[in-house]
Image: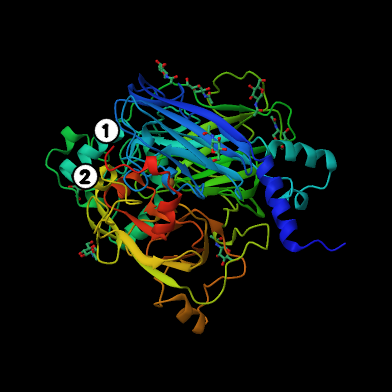
Amino acid sequence: MLVPFKSVLSALVLASAASAKVVEYALNLTSTYSAPDGVYREVYLVNGSSPGPLLTCDEGDYLSVMVYNNLPVPITVHWHGIHQKDTPHLDGAAGITQYPIDPGSSFHYNFTTVDQYGNFWYHAHLRARYQDGVYGAIYIKPKDSRPKPYSSIVSDPAALAEILEKDSNPTQLAVADWYKWTSDAILAREFTYGIDPPCIQSFLINGKGRIVCQDAGAISAAGTWRQEGVYGAAGYIPNFDSQGCTNITLINGFTGADQQALEAPGNSIQCAPSETDREVIYVNGSSYMVFDLSNMGGEMGVHFSIDSHPFWVVMVEGVYIEPQLVEQIYVGVGHRFLILVETNKEYGIYGMRFASYELAQIIEALAFLSYVPDVGQPFRPSDNVTVYQDIGGNLVGDFTLFNVSIASPFDTSVKPPTGAADHTIHLLSNRSGVVYFSLMEDGSRMSQDMEISEPVLWADPLPDDGVIINPGIKTGDLIDIILDNTNLIAHPIHLHGHNFYLISESSSENFPYDTVADAIAADYAPLNFNNPPYRDGYSVQTGGHIVLRFIADNPGAWMLHCHLNTHLMGGMGVVIIEDREEAIKKIPKSYIKTSS
Ligand SMILES: *[C@@H]1O[C@H](CO)[C@@H](O)[C@H](O)[C@H]1NC(C)=O
Ligand SMILES: *[C@@H]1O[C@H](CO)[C@@H](O)[C@H](O)[C@H]1NC(C)=O
Ligand SMILES: *[C@@H]1O[C@H](CO)[C@@H](O)[C@H](O)[C@H]1NC(C)=O
Ligand SMILES: *[C@@H]1O[C@H](CO)[C@@H](O)[C@H](O)[C@H]1NC(C)=O
Ligand SMILES: *[C@@H]1O[C@H](CO)[C@@H](O)[C@H](O)[C@H]1NC(C)=O
Ligand SMILES: *[C@@H]1O[C@H](CO)[C@@H](O)[C@H](O)[C@H]1NC(C)=O
Ligand SMILES: *[C@@H]1O[C@H](CO)[C@@H](O)[C@H](O)[C@H]1NC(C)=O
Ligand SMILES: *[C@@H]1O[C@H](CO)[C@@H](O)[C@H](O)[C@H]1NC(C)=O
Ligand SMILES: [Cu+2]
């Protein structure tokens, strides 16, 4: 029997709408005084812990999250990687899509996860406050119909069943850098003294860390690439202090008189070790483990490896990929990976190593993967393990680093449209002063005032601000963003509201054409329409470029910004206006206010 296509389609839509649940959570943000790495300071918590609780639901469900702000400061919460389809006002970007939530107030976020699955995270999106502890993971369990890469890795049905079970409930592994001062104190120093504070005190793994003082010789040995790389090319010869921090006077040209009094990193902080608990993850007899590995920090990308355990990278930012078997992976700020680890090694304790892979600092944190139950606080891994990387994140043998450029979707139907774009947006990453960063070609910087102004999404008229990009995008248009990086730092760029296809990238040249159409005509080699990565964030390398392509299918006002907090606060963000008239129609009338 012939069934008209349209009625099949509407039956499907009804079926999927009927199965979508509303999954309710509440997050209570509070402030306390504690010492997760051994040094007391003010810390922000989500339901009494940091990271906050894991939020989880099935693909297509609504996540209904009530946020209670019991912090001493205003806040918002952003749902990183979730597109906010039809809820452009719930993206959580302060001053872009909402007013800050004042202390003592609450705010209800209720959004769909339709067409999205996998690993996401939530974090505060006002000032740099998420790095004080307001962050946690979101895991959206994929529909059974999603093609998964595991059967290309193992064929044994029992193993496959174990892996699929772990895949629906991965073990969380969140790294975040941690500071002596609160983010507000850091920003105050940054903009009062013009000092870029690129160094950190420690890393927290699932909220636990300690200060480890490394031997000066080990620091210096691990620092080689920093000396040979772009620093060397620029004539710098970094020396490292006892916390592994390079001399910021050399890096930044910061010549603030009283560096000692400011305790400027790289000049005067003497490393003092602590003895706090580190994270121990027990194998518990598993043959395989699946980790949701994410960087929820504010400043430092890391090189990650697990002693003696190569692993398969199977998902990048909510998209299953063609799996890669590697010993090491770079996890930039905001980046998330699902990794599959075969836990078939000898009874023992293995280091999970997180080493800064940024220019500024040689610093490493350990967590432990233990086959031994109830191990307490191991001082170090077992003797008989293979260590893949040093404290500077350098591979110490013939091992493999995950190749991010070729991490293409496992579902090969996830491909970009080819041909010419309707709109090409040119961005340029530039550093115009020690603490000033920009993305606009004319050097316009996002101001911190924007975060506390009437939200760009509905402000009437649209503010006349240099970082608001409004090329007249209509629903259905094809957009290219060409971003060139001219400065000495790589930047983890994050786009709100969309995934993008990375149709071109280079770590050695800026994009040499005005448009992608010109590049196609010239057969530009780096172009990739066949199997490009499909992500919500990507690091643009020093002296290189990235080209991001997406279809305008989500009316709203979407930030594109560097996820390093000091860079964002120094101006490194823009807002892309996408069919704002349509977006405003989707916002409940009661919601649009002219003041907070
Ligand atoms: C967090 O705390 C809120 C408010 O106290 C509570 O209603 C909620 O159930 C907690 N949520 C989770 C995920 O623990
Ligand atoms: C949030 O936590 C604080 C401190 O524990 C508590 O006093 C307050 O009642 C909680 N709020 C909610 C909405 O659960
Ligand atoms: C969340 O939104 C969905 C879709 O509009 C709605 O069905 C549901 O009732 C809402 N949940 C809450 C708690 O408001
Ligand atoms: C850092 O570099 C500056 C400029 O070269 C130099 O004057 C200063 O002594 C250095 N500081 C340290 C601690 O090495
Ligand atoms: C291992 O078992 C302990 C105790 O039952 C449990 O708390 C822990 O979550 C398990 N770890 C993993 C990674 O499943
Ligand atoms: C160390 O590992 C090797 C290879 O896995 C093994 O043969 C040896 O027995 C181990 N030695 C100890 C002391 O565990
Ligand atoms: C990643 O793979 C591409 C294509 O095979 C290759 O050209 C590139 O050198 C690789 N990059 C790294 C860092 O291994
Ligand atoms: C880029 O930064 C340099 C200083 O590093 C500055 O001279 C130049 O004006 C900046 N360009 C723009 C467009 O802001
Ligand atoms: Cu973000």
Q: Is mark 1 within 8 Å of ligand 4?
A: no
* Tag 2–tag 1 contact (CB < 8 Å): no
Identify which residue, 361 or 224, lies in the foreground. 361
Q: Quadrant of residue 429?
A: bottom left
Disc 1 marks a residue whose amino acid type is Ile
- Please name the residue that numbered disc 1 is placed on: 269
Q: Quadrant of the N terminus?
A: bottom right
- Please name the residue that numbered disc 2 is placed on: 195
Report helix, strand or loop for mark 2.
Answer: loop
Label 2: few (<14), some or many (≥20) within 10 Å? many
Identify which residue, 385 or 317, lies in the foreground. 317
Disc 2 marks a residue whose amino acid type is Ile
Point out residue 211 in the picture as x, y percentages from the top left corner: 40, 28
Q: Is residue 50 left or right of residue 16?
A: left
Which residue sits at x=25%, y=58%? 465
Q: Is residue 351 visible?
A: no
